[in-house]
């Protein structure tokens, strides 16, 4: 239908609907599908019966995004987010207003709004804390609704197979059980605020280089036990409204038209009742994508607009298939509560957001090194502190791309701008030691920074690694001469502390020369206060790495990042023959060996292992007992042997029987314990059989390999003082 006519039709319907509401205020409520006692499925079926073909098509595609190819004709109906889907006003079905919201709601500046920046998703994963994940999601859910959005595009779940991936900060690390559990808890609580929840990018979108063109090649077993397992766990916990299929192809078929991923696994095997939304521009076909299980194209209607209507009318897409797409969207709208609880604009709770952001940042900051009790700093003994590093006087760096949260007081950043959040390490540290001299040097000239360090009691270097969607890092070194800066400062002052603001792992050639290292990640709106609280011991660090820090890129499964040749890049290359085809491949031949599983299997030393993190107190582990059964339980005691209260993340790993053909061990559970000095507590961790199973091919399916299982417990993946072997059948 002609666009102008479409707009007219939409406004006419809206006007008639409004008129009806005025005549009879209870009109919408009187519709049978407005009965909230009915199940979401029943309500969806009732609405579906009333819908015309055009209304159905309207639900299956977006209506543009500012800056995306051409402005769409009805762009003014949007809420300023990444996309929107028309509702059916005459039936009381609202529009879906979507916003990116990885670590906070995106695009505030352009829309004249404000959002809290939480610590990055990777940072929050370092808390290993399901309650923190829940608070994270709930805050974002509240801020989305306050701004008029009813769908989040957050929920990054991809595993860190490739630590140079520029989006590593948007994900939850390298272990499927940790990542799936945390994203599930985050999305469950976000969705409880009555927004449509989404987890993404399904699947194996594990690098940004050539993301639209790449064919991710991976064995079925490795796929199911690693990347897909994280999604599976997340989906079971959160029951999200939507799953976003990714840009890349997986084993030959683009993810958004990949029947194995979307239908066989997601919808049939996992019984996912929600809808599949394409990543932005990730749809490449009409008939194939629809048959494979894609339900909603974003951000436009290239394939799921007129072409889909034609395909339905000519019988190429069965009406039942079309209805299935529509039903899934309607069902999610009812299940999430966006119909029963329409958004109400309100002012974001700025102070409450600060409080949550700071608390989660404190729980996310990992103490990596602390020689001779350098930390915590004792304010009463310090006369002078040198604060060194780019912008450390005013702000801390944040992660870029569609995850970007806009900083208050600054204009809207452009794509790939480095965005500094106004949380000032200098100010936060000054507040801790009002009587000491606190001086700042940007580090641009390492010589002058070293001079300042020399005449100070301690030197704190804030080192920065910026990453973003749309790029990968060439390597894991700190850029812009920062390694040399740290070397020089450390040579000038033996009491040098490095605070890292990074989106992924970094190599640390200077590690032996500094006294302490703190990983603060992208720490969000209140990052500086959190770091100051950790450095001065107001908070005892408890976070543990959700990913391995390797010694060098040479130790990675793929020492060289695989990048596409120039002629194989871009939409034109992919769509060349009219039928979309990936143009180059990354072969994930490390298979099951993701992250620590790789370094363990290859017997490689690492810089800092998965699960590692220090505290200002010490813990002792004892008395492991394993009770095998349908749900195996692992019991042991943790004692705080130091003089400060603290939270310990106690971890349990399992080594499967040798004939299972698995990497040496896998994380199967953990517990975060608060322990006062001298206190000990027995902890019991339940290990579901799924966490001990493998995915067999021929015949396909999960199975427990009968044999000897060794359960190990301790403070990190490479420090497991307790072990016990049992037989499981
Ligand atoms: C990203 C998605 C994002 C979408 C909308 C894409 O480029 O890959 O994660 O949700 O844009 O902004």
Image (tube, grey):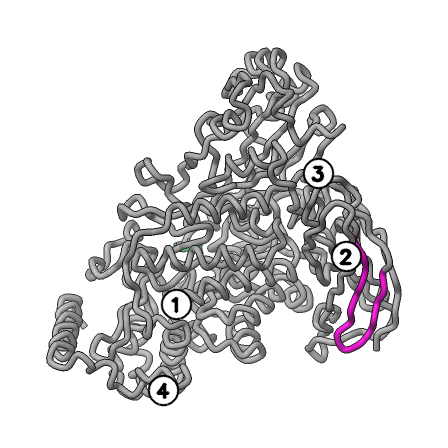
- Closer to the chain start, of discs 2 and 3, is 3
- Closer to the chain start, of discs 2 and 1, is 1
Mark 4 in CB contact with mark 1 (< 8 angstroms): no
Q: Over which residues does the magenta segment extend?
A: 624-638
Q: For mark 4, what is the residue?
A: 45
Q: Where's the C terminus, which quadrant?
A: bottom right
Q: Position of residue 662 (x, y in %)?
A: 78, 63
Q: Position of residue 10 (x, y in %)?
A: 17, 71
Quarter of the rendering containing residue 406: top left
Count neighbours of disc 2 (C-alpha within 10 A) and say few if under 14, some if 14 to 19, many if 20 or more: some
Question: Viewed as shown, does residue 158 lie left or right of 221?
Answer: left
Ligand 1 is located in which of the four quadrants? Answer: bottom left
**x 59%, y 43%: residue:** 504
Q: Where's the N terminus, which quadrant?
A: bottom left
Q: For mark 2, what is the residue?
A: 681
Q: For mark 3, what is the residue?
A: 616
**x 53%, y 25%: residue:** 389
Count neighbours of disc 1 (C-alpha within 10 A) and say few if under 14, some if 14 to 19, many if 20 or more: many
Disc tally is 4
| Mark drawn on residue 194 | 1
Mark 2 in CB contact with mark 1 (< 8 angstroms): no
Mark in the foreground, 1 or 3? 3
Mark in the foreground, 4 or 1? 1
Magenta stretch encompasses residue 629: yes
Q: CA distance from mark 1 to mark 3?
A: 40 Å
Mark in the foreground, 2 or 3? 2
**x 62%, y 49%: residue:** 126
Toward the viewer: 719 or 142?
A: 142
Helix, strand or loop under label 3: loop
Magenta stretch encompasses residue 375: no
Q: Position of residue 141 (x, y in %)?
A: 41, 59
């Amino acid at each position: 239908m002609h666009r102008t006519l479409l707009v007219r039709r939409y406004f006419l319907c809206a006007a008639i609907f409004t008129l009806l509401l005025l005549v009879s205020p209870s009109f919408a409520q009187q519709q049978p599908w407005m009965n909230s006692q009915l199940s979401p499925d029943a309500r969806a079926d009732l609405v579906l019966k009333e819908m015309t073909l055009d209304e159905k098509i309207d639900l299956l595609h977006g209506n543009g995004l500012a800056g995306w190819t051409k402005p769409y004709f009805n762009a003014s109906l949007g809420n300023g987010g990444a996309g929107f889907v028309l509702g059916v006003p005459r039936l009381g079905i609202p529009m879906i207003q979507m916003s990116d919201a990885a670590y906070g709601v995106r695009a505030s500046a352009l829309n004249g709004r404000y959002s809290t920046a939480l610590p990055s998703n990777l940072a929050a994963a370092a808390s290993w804390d399901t309650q923190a994940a829940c608070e994270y999601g709930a805050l974002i859910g509240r801020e989305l609704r306050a701004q008029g959005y009813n769908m989040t595009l957050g929920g990054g779940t991809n595993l860190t197979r490739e630590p140079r991936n520029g989006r590593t900060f948007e994900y939850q690390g390298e272990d499927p059980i940790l990542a799936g559990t945390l994203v599930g808890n985050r999305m469950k609580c976000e969705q409880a605020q009555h927004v449509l929840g989404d987890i993404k990018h399904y699947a194996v979108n594990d690098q940004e280089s050539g993301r639209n063109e790449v064919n991710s090649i991976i064995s079925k077993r490795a796929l199911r036990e690693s990347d897909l397992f994280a999604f599976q766990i997340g989906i079971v916990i959160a029951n999200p409204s939507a799953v976003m299929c990714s840009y890349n192809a997986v084993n030959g078929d683009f993810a958004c038209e990949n029947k194995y991923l979307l239908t066989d696994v997601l919808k049939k095997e996992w019984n996912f009742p929600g809808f599949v939304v394409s990543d932005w521009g990730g749809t490449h076909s009409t008939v194939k994508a629809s048959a494979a299980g894609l339900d909603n194209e974003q951000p436009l209607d290239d394939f799921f607009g007129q072409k889909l209507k034609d395909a339905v009318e000519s019988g190429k897409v069965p009406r039942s298939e079309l209805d299935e797409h529509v039903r899934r969207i309607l069902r999610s709208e009812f299940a999430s509560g966006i119909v029963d609880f329409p958004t109400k604009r309100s002012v974001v709770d700025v102070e409450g957001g600060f409080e949550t952001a700071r608390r989660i940042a404190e729980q996310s900051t990992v103490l990596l090194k602390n020689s001779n009790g350098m930390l915590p700093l004792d304010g009463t003994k310090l006369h002078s502190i040198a604060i060194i590093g780019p912008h450390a006087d005013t702000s801390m760096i944040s992660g870029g791309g569609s995850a970007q949260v806009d900083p208050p007081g600054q204009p809207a950043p452009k794509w790939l701008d480095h965005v500094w959040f106004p949380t000032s390490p200098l100010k936060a540290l000054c507040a801790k030691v009002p009587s000491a001299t606190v001086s700042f040097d940007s580090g641009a000239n390492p010589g002058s920074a070293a001079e300042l360090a020399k005449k100070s009691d301690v030197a704190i270097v804030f080192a920065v690694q910026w990453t973003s969607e749309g790029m990968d890092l060439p390597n894991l070194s700190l850029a812009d001469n920062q390694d040399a800066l740290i070397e020089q400062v450390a040579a000038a002052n033996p009491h040098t502390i490095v605070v890292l603001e990074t989106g992924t792992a970094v190599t640390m050639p200077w590690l032996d020369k500094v006294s302490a290292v703190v990983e603060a990640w992208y720490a969000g709106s209140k990052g500086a206060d959190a770091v100051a609280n950790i450095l001065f011991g107001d908070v005892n660090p408890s976070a543990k790495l959700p990913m391995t820090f390797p010694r060098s890129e040479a130790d990675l499964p793929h020492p060289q990042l695989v990048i596409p040749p120039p002629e194989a890049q871009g939409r034109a290359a992919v769509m060349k023959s009219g039928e979309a085809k990936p143009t180059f491949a990354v072969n994930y031949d490390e298979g099951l060996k993701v992250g620590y599983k790789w370094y363990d299997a290859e017997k490689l030393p690492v810089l800092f292992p998965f699960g590692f993190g220090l505290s200002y107190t010490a813990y002792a582990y004892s008395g492991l007992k394993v009770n095998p059964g349908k749900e195996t339980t692992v019991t042991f005691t943790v004692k705080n042997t130091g003089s400060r209260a603290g939270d310990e993340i106690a971890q349990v790993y399992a080594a499967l029987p040798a004939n299972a053909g698995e990497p040496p061990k896998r994380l199967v559970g953990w517990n975060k314990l608060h322990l006062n000095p001298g206190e000990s507590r027995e902890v019991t961790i339940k290990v579901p059989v799924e966490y001990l199973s493998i995915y067999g091919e021929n015949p396909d399916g999960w199975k427990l390999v009968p044999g000897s299982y060794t359960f190990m417990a301790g403070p990190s993946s490479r420090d497991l003082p307790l072990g016990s072997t049992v037989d499981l059948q």
